[in-house]
Amino acid sequence: MSFVAIVYFSGYGHTAKQADAVAEGVKAAGSELRVYRISDTGDLPEGTLEELSGASAIIYGSPTYMGSVAWQFKKFADASSKVWVTQGWKNKLAAGFTNSASVSGDKCATIAALWTLAMQHGQIWIGTGLLPANLKASGPADVNWSSGFGGAHAISPADATVDEAPRSGDLETARLLGLRVAEFAKKLG
């Protein structure tokens, strides 16, 4: 049976909270879910890369550090070349999410890195499909307040605890991304 997978790294817990929101969306669609958190040393359990070949969709997540993915996520991405050679993830859906302390924080560069990984594997990328909350009255509680179209963005101020951030609008944006990916996966069978 196929499943939706979330593969992510979180350095301080904020991106893990965002991954949990993505997972809520996947579960809301009634899809089977498997979550793989990359360790602080950039590793996943033995056999994970091969196991991901059974997924119908892989949703990638990483905090934005210095304008790109965390090195731990990059280690996973580089290791995935073993699957690339066999085209094991070809035609699977893909999506991504990221989090940084700044409003912009070059999150688009991280989403681009996640997208590039998916394109290297021959995957089909799913964006958020959400309009931005770009009115004067809009704020952090609104869905897609930081205008992520290629993937879900979240903002966790540098002095915010995991209880304080990401904020509700960013978490709902992540949940909606998970829901959208799972719904597309069901349509494709």
Image (cartoon, grey):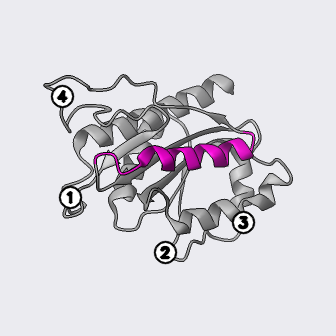
Q: At x 51% / y 45%, what residue is drawn?
A: 111
Q: Is residue 19 left or right of residue 58?
A: left
How crowded is the residue under tag 4: few (<14 C-alpha within 10 Å), some, or many (20+)?
few
Select label 1 or label 2 by which is in front: 2
**Front: mark 3 or 2:** 2
Of 179 and 83, the residue lying toward us: 83
* Front-most of residues 188 and 104: 104
Closer to the N terminus: mark 1 or mark 2?
2
Taking the image as drawn, is residue 30 in sight? Answer: yes
Q: Amino acid at mark 4?
A: Ser
Residue indicated by mark 2: 40
Q: Which residue is mark 4?
A: 138
Q: Is residue 167 left or right of residue 107?
A: left
Q: For the residues marked 1 and 2, what is the alpha-carbon distance in whole angstroms?
A: 21 Å
- The residue singled out by tag 1 in the image is 163
In the image, residue 39 lies at what x, y percent?
52, 72
Disc 2 is placed on an element classified as: loop
> Main SS type for the magenta part?
helix
Secondary structure under tag 4 reads loop
